[in-house]
Amino acid sequence: MKNSLRIILAKQKKTVSDVHKATGLSKNTVTALYYERSDNPYLKTLLKIADYLDVSLDELLA
């Protein structure tokens, strides 16, 4: 699934590990989203990441 996670993390100088630790999501889940290998992530997962990064869901999925 296309998303802007990689770009947002780079701009905020954060890592996959930061997201994993702050949200409680598995590192595998966050990594799959980072590399756009996740076909159908749960909305709840995307909302947790967007909330942690202080971005809208639209920005995350742009």
Image (spheres, rainbow, N blue to C red):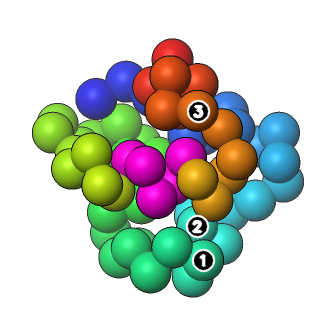
On screen, 58 above or below 35?
above
Q: Are marks 2 and 1 in contact (CB under 8 Å)?
A: yes
Give the residue drawn at x 58%, y 53%. Answer: 51
Name the residue carrying label 1. Answer: 22
Q: Nearer the viewer, mark 2 or mark 3?
A: 3
Rate crowding at label 1 as few (under 14), some (14 to 19) or many (20 or more) other CA atoms within 10 Å.
Answer: few
Is residue 4 something one can see in this rendering?
no
- Residue 37 location, quadrant: top left
Q: Is residue 32 left or right of residue 12?
A: left
Residue type at mark 1 is Ala
**Which mark is first along the chain, 3 or 2?**
2
Could one spot residue 38 in this view of the protein?
Answer: yes
Mark identifier at residue 42: none
Range of residues picked out in magenta: 46-50
Residue 10 against residue 56 in the figure, above or below:
below
Q: Which residue is mark 2?
A: 19
Rounded to the nearest angstrom, the CA distance separating label 2 from label 3 is: 16 Å
Q: Amino acid at mark 3?
A: Ser
Per the image, is 38 magenta?
Answer: no
List x then y, in percent, for residue 12.
83, 48
Q: Locate residue 4, reporting x and y percent.
A: 55, 29
The reply, left or right, for residue 38 in relation to residue 60 is left
Is 49 inside the magenta-drawn segment? yes
